[in-house]
Amino acid sequence: MAVEFESVVTVSAAKQIAESLRAAIMDGRLKVDERLPTEEELAQRFKVSRPTVREALKRLAAQHLIRSRRGPAGGNFVSSPAPEEAAQSLANAATLMVAVGDISLDAMATARLELEVVCCRLAASNRTDEHLDAMRRELQAQRNAALTDEEFCASDIRFHRAMVDASGNTLLQFLMHAVVEALQPVSNMIIFRVRDRQAIVGFHERILHSVESRDAETGAAALADLVAYTRDRYREALERRADRTG
């Protein structure tokens, strides 16, 4: 491998080595499935100890940028992107930012509406029978009054995920994973006592029918009504909480 790396200072050397290797991966100097130099070779190139290199490699492994393989042909190799893991990391970050108040639920709801409307328009054109079947299964499950709140929430997420998947756009699917997975559990946790499940089912029925009949405008209207309903219930839940603590 002919990739050249700059020397680093001793302080935070592991972090700097990890960042240098990460940059080489991100800009294509290190290719997917390419074997990295050995720990000894990296230690010599960066002029640090092997434990420092080992720590840098651990950082890259934690970011799913490299993977290790044992045996005679083993070593550390550049990993191919794992969309599910990356999307979940994005969702976790978004959930944390909502939890600490860096992102408001209202801002998340607005983002969800705008992105999901685009997905709905694409789904109306690109959906398959498999996508429709997945949405129907979740809608049928949501009509079951015996579902716990947690089960209803999980089905709610799966319904919207199926609609987003029907868009056929991988970038939107990636982005919406964070919005749906982060927003809905948090908002459902707040509004589950004041929401009407049948109202949610009604919105979902309208969305499914619009995708099934390839009527994107009706779907966009149903999504707008769903987000407006969720916002109203969120405000109602906060008002009730304020009354109890006031």
Image (cartoon, grey):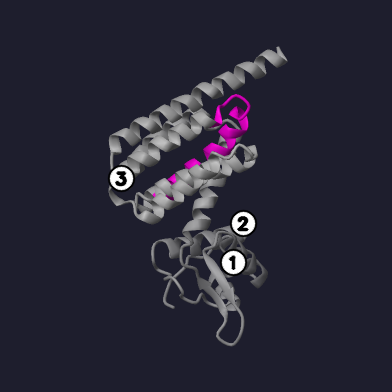
Say what amino acid the circle numbered 3 marks.
Answer: Ala
**First of labels 1, 3 by sequence position:** 1
Q: Nearer the viewer, residue 207 or 98?
A: 207
Name the mark nearer the viewer: 2 or 3. Answer: 3
Work out whether residue 162 can be spotted.
Answer: yes
Instruction: Name which residue lies at 58% across and 30% down.
Output: 101
Distance (Cα) linking label 2 and label 1: 14 Å
Q: In the current view of this chain or complex, which residue is farthest to the right? A: 245
Distance (Cα) linking label 1 and label 3: 45 Å
Q: Nearer the viewer, residue 73 or 36?
A: 73
What percent of the width, then of the height, locates residue 174? 43, 50
- Disc marking residue 12: 2
Q: Dominant secondary structure of the magenta stretch?
A: helix
Q: Which element type, helix, strand or loop, lies under badge 1?
A: helix
Distance (Cα) linking label 2 and label 3: 51 Å
What percent of the width, then of the height, locates residue 76? 55, 74
**Can you tell which quarter of the image residue 60 is in?**
bottom right
Instruction: Name which residue lies at 39% across and 50% down.
Output: 132
Say what amino acid the circle numbered 1 marks.
Answer: Leu
Report which residue position mark 3 lands on: 124
Report which residue position mark 1 lands on: 57
